[in-house]
Structures are given as structure tokens and as C-alpha cells.
Image (spheres, grey):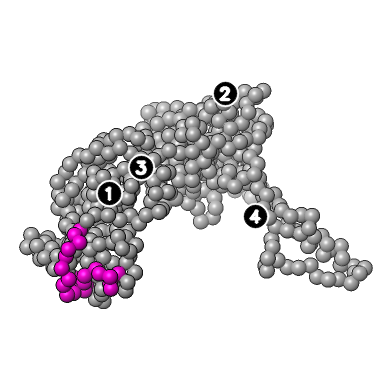
Amino acid sequence: MTSNSFLRAARRTLTAGAAALLIGAATVPSLVTPAAADDGPASVADLAQGLLGAVVNISTSQRVKGTEGPGAVPMPQLPEGSPFQDFFDDFFKNRPGEQGNPSQKVQSLGSGFVVDAEQGIVVTNNHVIADADDIEVNFSDGVTLKATLVGTDTKTDVAVLKVDPKGHKLTAVKFGDSSKMRVGDWVMAIGNPFGLGGTVTVGIVSARNRDINSGPYDDFIQTDAAINRGNSGGPLFNSAGEVIGINTAIISPSGGSIGIGFSIPSQLALGVVDQLRQFGETRRGWLGVRIQPVTDDIAESLGMATAKGALVAGVIKGGPVDNGTILAGDVIIKFDGRDVNEMRDLPRVVAESTVGKAVDVVIVRKGVEQTVKVTLGRLEDGEKLASGENGNTDKDTGDEAPAVSTASVLGMTVGELNDETRTKFGIAAEVSGVVITDVAKDSAAAERGIQAGEVITEIAQESVATPKDVMDRIAALKEQGRKNALLMLASKSGELRFVTIRMD
């Protein structure tokens, strides 16, 4: 091919490519209706310009001790005047942990945002500043201010910092209502990915109420707005420029954004921030119960039409409901006017409630729905109390049950709980009921993970004290046409759990 023919072919190729680009561009406006343009504007420059000043980069440093112990490699002994002396001096004597260099400074970067310009209050993630010796807040105009820690909450991964704004005018942003966000709504993330500085990304709300098993109150907003390392602690904005989330986590095999990021919803974060600012710590409501999910089998055993709510597996001794208001075996389906559709809903709504508040709790007890009034305690006090007890409800199941022989039922061998069996299985003195002495292999009980040494305290919410009680309760359930038996089991130390066993 001559040079002229090559040029003519190149022109034809470029012309065809340009036409294809023009055709593609011509089709774009037809895909975006005016209504969609209002919700997701073609340009977010004005919105971003007004928010960048409130988003900060957070730099932390921590001094860590040098490597010591058997894993450390000692400096070799060299002859005096060795030509390798300088090399080994540089390599070994400048290591952390050697004399004259006992520690090294480790730095990390994250993001945050100002919520109170006058007071200099900055919100970020707890994991951004955890264990930091020094915290600096870097603003978009180049100013850097030292920060002090106001308070942190590990359960929600929220931290509050304070800087001295004297001589520096700060820009603040407000929290919005995350409960109003819908899947598909436009959102904007601003942060400090990979230490690059203020970076704006845009996407939508991909999902809500995500549980990623990072804490007891997981209720994340999922977004496809690009979030990378360094974005942690930065804000997620709605189209009105309000903070509706705190960017916290990503799912990524590579460490970079693949369009799956998670933000703490403002509805959860706002209360935590207010408590940290006011008290320097959280003060959450506490109900004082141990709970487990309501499965289909458990719902059928309790006579419930659908599996919903949180099943009370135990009551904390000395807690707010240790007065008999709520009992093991109750199913909580509504708390303070808010539905409890599944187990994980209850801890969150209780924690968001005020300590000392009297609330209505709707429960299902033995198939009957009823409302009880409960005054909440404080979770932080309850955690100390719960750590020192075993969760036993300390109910009296009778002290005068006559001694009887063992019995076999549903693949289990059960016997009287006396001094001999307590000693054999190491069962605590406060545990009462009927001890399981053996579980048949491949039985219905074995499939449910029931083990010898566990104690049956209730069957279908009725206390049992003897092997005969167990046999009678199972027989009664079969006569009622029940397919499952609901057992409340106590561990050797008294911790309770519910298990259903098929009886057919």
C-alpha cells in the first residue's frame, strides 16, 4: 500500500469512528428524561463546590515499639575494620527496637466532616483514629489543625473530634434523614481516597438495611458511589447536600472500589454523635434479655401464623425485666411502636431509646398477643451485669419432684437432675430441669446439636422437673397435632437457648 492510499484508508476509518461517536452521543438525551435530570443532574459541580470545604482529611500517627523477642535477628559480630561494618550498622542499628531507636512512627489517613463550625466538631470513623497518639485535621484550603478526641463508639464505628477553630473560619454540613432515602436515589461521596485529597464520586443508593456482620447494630446504606481506602469517615450526601451516611466499609477482593460500599445511616449515627458530644460516651437503652431468631419451626411450635419477631431465650438477672414482665419463651413483635420483624431489629431499636424511658412492648406469650410496660436500663451498665451472670431466669420449677428412672424420648435419654448428675456433667447449682444423659446418633435431637449434659427446663413453654414430665409434655403435644416440640435448654453454666425437634 502506498503512503497516499494508507492516508485515504485512515481518513475513512476516522470518519466512520467519528460517525459512531456522534450516533452514540445523539442517543444519550433520549435516555434521560427531564424528570430524571432533576433527580440526577448532569453536573454536580455546584453541589460539590458548596460541600468540599466541610470535608476534611484526617491524618493520624502512632508510635509502635520495635521488633523484639525470638523473631528478631541479632547483628552479626564482625572483625574490627571490616569493610561490611557500615552496611550492617545501617541495616541493624537503625531498626525499630535497637538502642537509640526504640520505636517507629506509623501514619494513616482517613476522612471526616465538620458538623459544628463554631465548636470545631468533626465526625469520622472510630477505626480511622483508633490507637492514634496524634490526630491532625487537614482542610481543603490547606490549613492543618491539631484535633482532640471527644469520644468514640466501637459498636457503630463512630468517633467525634474537636479542633480549635480560632482564627480559621470553618464550613459545616448538616445531617439529613436517611430513612427517607430510597433505592435508586442519587448520592455523592467526598473523601480522601489513597491520600489523594478531596475527591468527589457520585452514585445511587444500591440497597438499604444491609447487615455485614461488623457490629450489633448493622443497618448500612449500600451505594455504588466509588469508595476506596481513605474514604472511611467521609460523608455520603443526598441531592440536597445533607449527610445521610458515614462511609465506612467496602467489599473488594482487590482493595479498590468495585461499586459495593457501605455507609452508616444518619438515623443511627446522629444519636451516637449527640451522646458522644454531650457525655463523651454512649448511653443506650437496655432491655435485659437474651434473644434468638424465630424460625418457621419455632413459630409453628408457638402457634404463630408467621415467623417474625425476637424470641426471648433468657432474662438477665437484675435487669429491667427481671420482675416477670417479660419471660423466656416470649416473642417480642413490637417495641415502642416499632415493628420487630426479625431478631436483629430489636437490639437496634432498644439501643436508640432513651435510658429510663417507659415503653410499650408487644409480646406473644403462649400464643396470645399482649402488651407490657417496660422501663429501660442502660446498656453499658447491663453489659457489666451480664458478664457476671449466666443468663438463668432463676425460675422455680419445683424442689419436691420425686426421684424417677431415666426415660427415652425423641432420641434422647433424660434423667433426674441430682447431685450425682450435676457432678458428672459439671452442671451449676442454679440450673434446674431434666438432664440429658445421652443423645442417639443420627436422631432428631442430634441433628439439632443437642448434647449430653444439657438440661431441659421447659417444653412448649411449660416447666419440666422429672423425666415423666418430659414424656407427658411430648405426649400432650402429639395429641394436639403438633409436629414440633419447642424445648428450652440450659447449658451447664445456665445459658438458655430454644430448640425445636420434629416429633413425627
Residue 310's mark? 1
Who comes first in sequence, dot 3 or dot 2? Answer: 2
User: What stretch of residues is rendered in magenta?
Assistant: 397-422
Real-space Cα distance between discs 3 and 1? 15 Å
Q: Which residue is mark 3?
A: 286
Residue found 78% across the figure and 62% down from its top? 92
Q: Report whether residue 167 is seen.
A: yes
User: Residue type at mark 2?
Assistant: Glu
Q: Quadrant of residue 96?
A: bottom right
Tell me the mark number nearer the camera, choosing from 1 and 4. Answer: 1
Q: Which residue is mark 4?
A: 1
Who comes first in sequence, dot 3 or dot 4? Answer: 4
Residue found 29% across the figure and 50% down from its top? 315
Residue 118's mark? 2
Q: Position of residue 406 (x, y in %)?
A: 18, 74
Residue found 39% across the figure and 49% down from its top? 385
Residue found 59% across the figure and 34% down from its top? 56
Tell me the mark number nearer the camera, choosing from 2 and 4. Answer: 2
Q: Position of residue 368 (x, y in %)?
A: 14, 46
Real-space Cα distance between discs 2 and 4? 74 Å
